[in-house]
Image: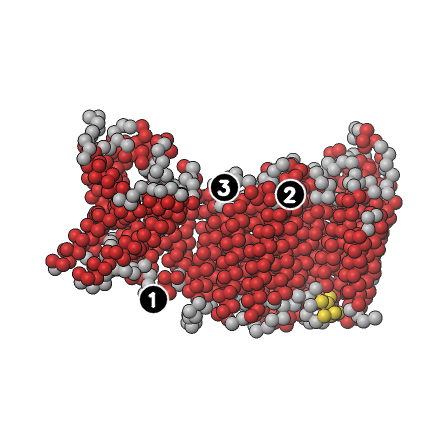
């Protein structure tokens, strides 16, 4: 089997699932196909990480399709999230009030979204990376507004408008980037081409290009102050879609931004790190404060996604090898924890039919397993030991404090403490204590669909494992990626 | 020397005699475009002639302003005629007496007295029209200023005779965005200043909706005739500035010779007919704006004018 | 400053950029949905003309293909798609409301234009005249289009604002990067069509479910 085979299979699997969803009228068949497709993609992503461990980069079509160490980690996160989300969605849809036609559409859009999402780290040509990122928005619009009520459409519209706006600003940045590349006489508009030309890129053009791309993709990743669409979109979107959007915003987009910053750092007089630091710190701090004042648990985790994206960018901007590695580690840890917390929240919603924090009290006394899972997942996302995020956040803090600008670490520590306290405060109020006065609707003793339970169990595995142990190939991948972002060609 | 004086007088005569014709042609074309037969192109002359033969009635409540206003309003465009190139591309006697801003002031003075007179007669419609004219005027003023400054910036001069050569030397200037933008802005200004659609409807008969027309309701006989004639001349003079100074100096006499001057008159008139045609199309295809949308119209003109400065300053 | 040889087409490129800027202002001032669409098509036509002029100037067949893509996607397909997906919203003749009045908005747009010149000044330094003409105006068009989106309340004008950003971005860059890979142009055109299709369908559903496309009125979702 050639080394590049897994790359094609990662695409082919959701494509086949898309075909099944398009022709089949049976929703269960489409759902199963989507799960199977994502599972195959996940397996292939694992193979990719393993290969990259030896070859450091795999090329399928030179300058067009290929994957480097960083990309392989990202695609691993995406495929894992895609698989568990498909599983959870299949279970949740069986309880959803929508008709078969709407559910069939759901699977079509879901597979299209996965195709675009997987394409981001696997494409090398920058213009196509941009296209893939834009398509993730357009394919997920109808997933966000899946519920079909006016509020869902409002959320979908805001989401589509703001993120497409961001993509349109980013296209200007991409074109400026190409201009910078063209002034060096090169026309190879791929990651490797950019790295090769990097020392000769004119800094004025490159700085402007990076800023435009940062703002554009920042609007898509809901960095503060471009986050207006995010709480609404998350509060209306189905839970598995929230998980996928979180992965898009805190793994795929930081991947693109960190790669670009790595290239910009190779040129003299680059301001890329300063801008990234600014946006990263504002997002991490602003989101920590937003978490305190929120009234819906779905929004709470949405803000936590912003916060993590901010932490990742800040660590990337600290610009030491260790900080970059910590940033990638944070991407990994957050990328596997976010699906778990959204699935756990999804089960809470299935059981209580409530979104507001104030309406949910005493979960533990109502459903023992549901409450405990939610509690554990909440602690995991807040960054408590012994879960994955605890270790990665610690790594981020350590590396930023050791960086040339140690105050970054101090500020980040403050933001992390604020968000930790805020999340656990809300969490304890929801889980512990006496149940609030319950109405008849919430009284119905619903059991969870088995698939949802399965999704939660599968999603919990890496969260726990990565809190104790990180497999060798992944460590190697993170290390290679960190070195590459620093500019040294592997 | 004598010829020069003659040319100067001829210039004034051309403006005085041909301006009603330009307005008549505009009215005729507008009706034709709307599918109607339309009045004769000489109808404006007949109107003015008729008004001169009617009695003048002046309210005993009004002051000297009301009596003086028609003469001042009539004199203003004639004075401006002396400052701008109408027939010749070389400067005449009064060319350096006042520049474009001076010409603007002279026209504004005429308008000022017209407005005063409208209030003076204490007709409620007059005061309403006056206040509306002032509103349009206030909004138009900054646009005028920016247009003039841009033109001066390009030509390093404020004298219209010098400015006009700038747009075709070198000929590439003719296609510069600044030129096109300035012409567009000034064209919009002419529509606003002479009370054409979409700012005002000159052929409307509903006093409450009038802007310009309602000011002259109180005038009769010779006063009304002068007002009407002066309005035609103002229109003609502004078109001259647009076509001769801003768009292009083609067709003007470049030597002091009788033949060239004689040729210039029909050429200039043809050029003005182009502008009249453009106004006809605008008037026939647009609807009158609501009063409060006029700010948007003139705001657009202002922005266009400033954009002209910008593109000129930076992309030169 | 380095002096660059003038090409006889430069003046026309310059002129096109002036008119392109004018269209951006028009997008703010247009009072009806159909008017917005017409301004957008006009702007796209100017973009195409500018691409054709540059194709002639640089003798580039790639740019000819780009012009072809522009004509097909922006001048033919988009108006057709919009008329199909959002016919009812398109033809209503009522006057659109802006959050900030037109004259004020125009002044802000003017300030944005100056900002665009300010930002691009270091980039334009020492560049040939065509670049100094088109680059700042492209940036200005992007800024003005973003501003248009924020002050419009209706779905379709907001969407046309989005498309205008893309126009501005390509107007700014086609002159500096005429060798931009064709695949990128195709990708952008494809993206524009997808935007129109998706947002068009979405706005039709919003219209269907709430009886209006004034998305600015949607305020159900708020953090209380």
Residue C37, image x, y percentages: 54, 49
Q: Which residue is mark 3?
A: C100
Are discs 3 and 1 located on one and the same chain? no
Q: Is residue A59 above or below residue A300?
A: below
- Around disc 3, counting alpha carbons within 10 Å, would you say few (fewer than 14), some (14 to 19), or many (20 or more)? few
Q: CA distance from mark 3 to mark 1?
A: 42 Å
Q: Is residue B305 left or right of residue C181?
A: left
Secondary structure type for disc 3: loop
Secondary structure type for disc 2: helix
Tell me which colouring the rendered structure shows. secondary structure
Q: Which residue is mark 2?
A: C204
> Are circles 3 and 1 on residues that touch, CB within 8 Å?
no
Are discs 3 and 2 located on one and the same chain? yes
User: Residue sitting at 70 percent across and 52 percent down?
Assistant: A139
User: Residue sitting at 36 percent across and 50 percent down?
Assistant: B277
Q: Residue furthest front?
A: B37
Q: Is residue A5 left or right of residue C54?
A: right
Residue A449, image x, y percentages: 86, 43
Q: Chain of mark 1?
A: B
Q: Which mark is residue B170?
A: 1
Q: Chain of mark 3?
A: C
């Amino acid at each position: 089997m050639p080394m590049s085979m897994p790359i094609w299979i990662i695409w082919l699997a959701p494509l086949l699932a898309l075909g099944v969803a398009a022709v089949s009228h049976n929703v269960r068949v489409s759902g199963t196909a989507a799960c199977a497709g994502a599972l195959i993609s996940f397996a292939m992503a694992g193979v990719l990480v393993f290969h990259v461990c030896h070859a450091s980069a795999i090329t399928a079509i030179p300058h067009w399709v290929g994957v480097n160490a960083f990309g392989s980690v990202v695609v691993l996160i995406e495929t894992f999230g895609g698989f568990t989300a498909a599983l959870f969605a299949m279970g949740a849809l069986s309880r959803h009030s929508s008709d078969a036609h709407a559910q069939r559409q759901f699977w079509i859009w879901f597979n299209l979204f996965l195709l675009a999402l997987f394409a981001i780290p696997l494409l090398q040509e920058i213009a196509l990376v941009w296209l893939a990122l834009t398509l993730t928005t357009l394919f997920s619009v109808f997933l966000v507004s899946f519920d079909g009520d006016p509020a869902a459409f409002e959320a979908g519209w805001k989401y589509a408008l703001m993120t497409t706006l961001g993509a349109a600003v980013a296209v200007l940045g991409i074109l400026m980037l190409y201009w910078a590349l063209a002034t060096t006489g090169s026309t190879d508009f791929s990651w490797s081409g950019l790295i090769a030309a990097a020392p000769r890129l004119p800094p004025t053009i490159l700085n402007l290009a990076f800023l435009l791309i940062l703002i554009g993709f920042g609007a898509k990743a809901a960095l503060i102050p471009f986050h207006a669409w995010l709480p609404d979109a998350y509060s209306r979107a189905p839970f598995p879609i929230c998980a996928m959007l979180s992965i898009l915003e805190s793994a795929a987009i930081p991947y693109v931004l960190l790669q670009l910053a790595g290239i910009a750092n190779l040129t003299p007089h680059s301001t890329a790190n300063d801008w990234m630091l600014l946006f990263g710190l504002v997002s991490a701090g602003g989101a920590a404060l937003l978490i305190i004042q929120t009234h819906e648990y779905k929004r709470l985790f949405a803000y936590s996604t912003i916060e993590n994206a901010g932490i990742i960018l800040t660590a990337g901007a600290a610009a030491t090898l260790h900080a970059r590695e910590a940033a990638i580690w944070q991407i990994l840890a957050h990328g596997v924890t976010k699906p778990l917390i959204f699935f756990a929240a999804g089960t809470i919603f299935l059981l209580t039919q409530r979104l507001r924090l104030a309406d949910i009290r005493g979960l533990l006394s109502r459903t023992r397993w549901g409450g405990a899972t939610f509690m554990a997942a909440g602690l995991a996302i807040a960054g408590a030991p012994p879960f994955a995020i605890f270790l990665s956040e610690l790594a981020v803090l350590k590396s930023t404090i050791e960086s040339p600008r140690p105050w970054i670490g101090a500020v980040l520590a403050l933001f992390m403490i604020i968000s930790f306290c805020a999340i656990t405060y809300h969490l304890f109020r929801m889980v512990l204590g006496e149940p609030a006065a319950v109405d008849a609707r919430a009284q119905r003793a619903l059991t969870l669909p088995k698939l949802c339970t399965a999704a939660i169990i599968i999603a919990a595995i890496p969260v726990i494992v990565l809190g104790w142990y990180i497999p060798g190939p992944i460590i190697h991948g993170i290390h290679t990626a960190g070195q590459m972002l620093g500019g040294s060609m592997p | 020397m004598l010829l020069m004086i003659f040319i100067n007088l001829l210039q004034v005569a051309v403006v005085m005699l041909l301006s009603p014709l330009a307005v008549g042609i505009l009215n005729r074309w507008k009706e034709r475009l709307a599918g109607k037969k339309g009045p004769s192109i000489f109808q404006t002359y007949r109107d003015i002639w008729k008004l001169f033969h009617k009695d003048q009635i002046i309210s005993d409540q009004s002051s000297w302003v009301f009596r003086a206003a028609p003469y001042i309003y009539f004199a203003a465009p004639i004075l401006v005629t002396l400052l701008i190139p109408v027939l010749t591309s070389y400067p005449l006697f009064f060319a350096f007496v006042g520049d474009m801003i001076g010409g603007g002031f002279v026209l504004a003075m005429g308008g000022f007295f017209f407005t005063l007179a409208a209030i003076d007669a204490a007709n409620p419609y007059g005061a309403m029209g006056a206040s509306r004219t002032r509103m349009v005027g206030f909004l138009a003023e900054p646009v005028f200023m920016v247009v003039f400054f841009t033109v001066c910036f390009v030509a390093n001069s404020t004298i219209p005779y010098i400015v006009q050569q700038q747009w075709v030397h070198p000929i590439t200037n003719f296609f510069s965005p600044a030129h096109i933008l300035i012409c567009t802005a000034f064209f919009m200004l002419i529509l606003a200043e002479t009370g054409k659609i979409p700012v005002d409807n000159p052929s409307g008969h509903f006093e409450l909706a009038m802007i310009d027309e309602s000011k002259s309701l109180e005038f009769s006989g010779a006063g009304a005739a002068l007002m009407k004639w002066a309005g035609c001349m103002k229109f003609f003079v502004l078109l001259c500035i647009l076509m001769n100074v801003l768009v292009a100096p083609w067709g003007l006499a470049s030597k002091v010779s009788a033949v060239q001057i004689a040729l210039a008159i029909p050429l200039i008139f043809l050029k003005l007919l182009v502008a009249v045609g453009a106004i006809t199309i605008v008037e026939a295809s647009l609807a009158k704006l609501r009063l409060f949308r006029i700010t948007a119209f003139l705001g657009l003109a202002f922005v266009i004018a400033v954009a002209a400065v910008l593109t000129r300053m930076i992309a030169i | 400053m380095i002096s660059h040889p003038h090409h006889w087409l430069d003046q026309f490129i310059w002129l096109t950029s002036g008119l392109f800027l004018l269209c951006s202002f028009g997008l703010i001032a247009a009072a009806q949905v159909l008017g917005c669409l017409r301004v957008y098509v006009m702007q796209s036509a100017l973009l195409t003309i500018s691409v054709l002029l540059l194709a002639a100037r640089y003798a580039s067949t790639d740019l000819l293909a780009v012009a072809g893509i522009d004509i097909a996607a922006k001048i033919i397909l988009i108006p057709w798609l919009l008329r199909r997906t959002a016919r009812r919203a398109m033809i209503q003749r009522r006057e659109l409301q802006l959050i900030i009045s037109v004259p004020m908005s125009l002044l802000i747009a003017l300030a944005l234009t100056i900002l665009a010149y300010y930002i691009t000044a270091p980039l334009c330094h020492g560049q040939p005249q065509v670049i100094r003409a088109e680059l700042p105006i492209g940036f200005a068009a992007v800024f003005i289009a973003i501003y248009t989106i924020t002050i419009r309340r209706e779905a379709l004008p907001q969407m046309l604002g989005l498309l205008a950003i893309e126009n501005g971005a390509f107007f700014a860059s086609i002159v500096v990067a005429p060798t931009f890979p064709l695949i990128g142009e195709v990708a952008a055109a494809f993206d524009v069509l997808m935007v129109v299709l998706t947002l068009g369908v979405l706005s039709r559903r919003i219209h269907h479910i709430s009886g209006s496309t004034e998305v600015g009125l949607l305020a159900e979702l708020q953090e209380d």
